[in-house]
Image (cartoon, rainbow, N blue to C red):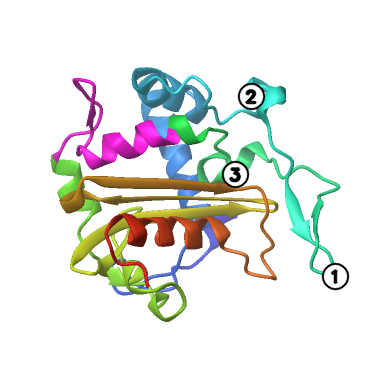
Amino acid sequence: SMSEADLLFAPGQDYSYSSPGIDLLGAVIAEVTGQSFEEYMTEQIFQPLGMADSTFLLPSADPTLLTAPHMYDEKGNAVVLDFYPYDRRNAASGGLYTSPADLSRMALMHLNRGELDGQQLLPASAYDEMWTPLSETGWMEYFGPTWDDYGLGWIMGEDGGHMVYNHTGANSGYQAHILVVPDADLAVVTFTNVFDRDEGSFHAYALGDQIMKMLLGMAE
């Protein structure tokens, strides 16, 4: 159990991405609010933002809107998985069912530092903390300068003179990416329904990064 695990390093001294850490955060939200993590997110985030097609509970998702997850076979062809990657225990770290339109509304909220359509869902001051670099990721050589540092839940870095705040998420057969560029008033969200951890097919990130470069006149 996590109670028996040791820290890899003192907080703030280094960086290592931790999905169990995000799941623990979801458990903290449930403990503090007295609601389940899924209920709290629906009532406090999705409903105020008008994200009607978003949920952390698979039984609540419209089955007609779910895309089929794919991975690559030995010939490099994308094939539908013979299982569905859902485990409620990992909802906080990788169980969001949403749409491009819905996630775009969340991206706009972040672009506006917690506000959308006159509603302040997160305090603007929270972004000063979330978007302050705490440690280097060590991933810049793989993903480029926008993956240089990590704050509180956000990966960030400068590219073409712009500070970019972003995050990617992936599970077997799926990947999504969100980025915001406040000084350019730009947000980009991308989805793919193919992902293979061994093959490293980070298509959603690559697409989002390239779209950002095109819109900012940085494309090669």
Residue at 79% over, 68% down = 76
Q: Which residue is mark 1?
A: 75
Amino acid residing under circle 3: Asn
Q: What residue is shown with label 3?
A: 90
Which is in the foreground here, disc 2 or disc 3? 2
Quadrant of the image occupied by residue 197: bottom right
x then y, percent, for residue 119? 22, 21
Give the x, y percent position of residue 46: 42, 24
Badge 3 marks a residue whose secondary structure is helix
**Quadrant including the C terminus:** bottom left
The answer to which of marks 3 and 1 sits earlier in the sequence is: 1
The answer to if 50 sits in the magenta stretch is no
> In this view of the protein, which residue sits in the foreground, 3 or 133?
133
118 part of magenta stretch: yes
Sequence order check: which comes first, mark 2 or mark 3? 2
Asked whether 138 or 91 is in front, the reply is 138
Magenta span of residues: 103-124
Circle 1: element type: loop
Question: Residue, x 51% and y 41% (percent of image)?
Answer: 92
- Look at 68% across and 41% down and name the residue there: 87
Q: Which mark is residue 61?
A: 2
